[in-house]
Image: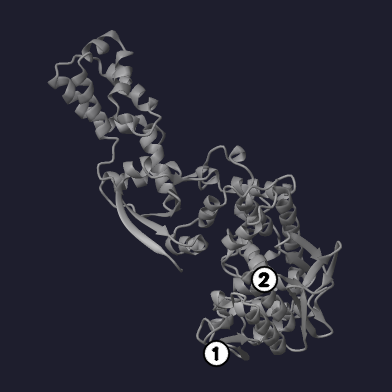
Amino acid sequence: MENKEFVLDQVTIKKLLTIYKLVIPDFQRSFVWKKQKKQQLLESLFRGFPIGAITLYEDGGAYYIIDGLQRINTLNQYLSSPSSVIRFDDFYEKIEDCIDEFMRENGIVLYDKHMRQCIKTWYEKLNKLYEFEKVSVLNSVLMSSTKEIAEVFKDLTKVEELLDIAKGKIEIVHDDVALIIYRGCKEDLPDLFRNINTGSIALSQYEILQSMWINNILDKEFLQETYEAFNKELELIRDRYEIQAVMSSGKFDIFKNIVGLNHEICCKKNANFLFHFSAFRELPNSDKEKKNTDKYFDNDGIAFEIYSTLLIHSPNKIVKAVDSLYKNGENITKISKFLCELNHIILLSIDDAVREIQRQEYSMSDSKYHSLYVLAGIIWSRYNIDLKNLIINEIPLNEKIYNESLNLEKHIMEKWFMDEKRQISFFNIKLEELAGLQTVYITDSGKVVEAGIYDGILAIKINGEIIMENTVKAFYRTIFKKLIKMGAPVGDYIPYATGKKRYLINKTGKHINEEPFVSPICVGEYYIETHKSKRGATRDIYNFIKKLGVDVEYVK
């Protein structure tokens, strides 16, 4: 993580809940622990045990909850309305002896049941944060009770003594809590969350994403099936959470869309032929019958990684992928239509993948990266996904991509996505190679046409001038000479990476992982990597020139 800063702090629970501007989006508010889990947390606090650090992301004076949402929700609920977490009978059992002693010492002669009823009325009436500390609230209850009780408690000091006894068994004496405050790039948040939260269940692994995307609204009229799938997913986790007003809470947004797509994927009966890894778990028949669901598998994140892979060419850049959808201020309708089509081709391509895998002699390896690679290949071989213009078009089948992505025999024989090749670095390299086989398409007068290559010749237009060459090396050499001559700010963007491990251009001739360029050229003080397919070379140089702010176009 670059430009990161972690600040360690310790504050009281009261300060955390009342001073800090905590951001809890509508979706997260709907999920809270069951009562037993809440009581376990409070019992730990009453006994002075630590409850772990709360991790927050600070941005513009607001604090997004990365880790600790359920603890904060529980504390906020209990300290606002204690009776919603701890029954009155259990509470009164703790203070009954103290109440009896208080009455004896003050010579108060009242029926126990009357006193108990007063305390119960006060306890169950509390509904605001730290309201139990206010003398006025208890005094109001006492003055509204029987004449005898109202007479006894005309003396306000007795009300204060009684309040001290009652609130003493509500308040949390050992209320210091450790904070870890993160300040840095928000794209690192999902990885940070996964690293620190080892107890995630259901959707909690991605809760932080929802807090980042509460304003990324979609029109559910274009995504009705996905919206319905999202609601079905919520129904399935009622036994893990208490869900309050789920069906009406908040607007339909990008997070809920991806969760809905994830549910649709898990409802595909043979999806495990493609998603053949342990985290894509088959649900027992007993669970399906008990929950009355068509869901065959349990997994909470594959749709997030599919989106990231298809849109950004990396499985762990979902924040960047979503930001790219909304960065140009596109209207909700256009984004919603784009995602409707994207969801559609993902689900169709999963079916295609399953059919092809079933036909072959070889099966998938136990790696989600293998699954993502195959699915991306099938989609890229048949569709052009234009993220910039939010357009998806069906294209003539790219047999090179299709055959390479589904060559399971080769994958298994060469141990792709196995052993030392299981890591994301290998996946990124293979995905980049696959992307390099893509034909670059642009929209011309309403038609989708191939751009950038003419019978093996590379071509691109810079500031109105067309540059054409036969090889990648000659193409790049001519382009960089032109960029330097025209005074483009090339040096401001060096080194420039095209993936997790690879640079397009650097001053040392080495990649991010310190491996030397495979096929470099040198223009001035810069080394340029030319070990690319012609289509990949055209795409990478186009993106780099756009980064410089120079006018560049694919040549039709």
**Res. 149 visible in picture:** yes
Residue denoted by label 1:
516
Q: Amino acid at mark 2?
A: Val
Relative to 3, is 420 on the left or the right? right
Q: Is residue 178 left or right of residue 296?
A: left
Looking at the picture, does residue 43 appear above or below residue 553?
above
Q: Nearer the viewer, residue 480 or 214?
A: 480
Q: Secondary structure at mark 2?
A: loop
Residue 45 in picture, x, y percent from top left: 30, 46
Q: Label 1 neighbourhood size at 10 Å, few (<14), some (14-19), many (20+)?
A: some
In x, y percent, where is residue 232?
65, 47
Residue 83 percent across, percent down from the top left: 38, 32
Q: Residue at x 61, y 48 (%)?
A: 291
10 and 414: which is toward the camera = 10
Label 1 secondary element: loop
Q: CA distance from mark 1 to mark 2?
A: 29 Å
- Tell me the tag on residue 30: none
Query: What coloring was used for the rendering?
Result: one colour
| Residue marked by disc 2 | 550
Q: Residues within 10 Å of mark 2 (few under 14, many from 20)?
A: some
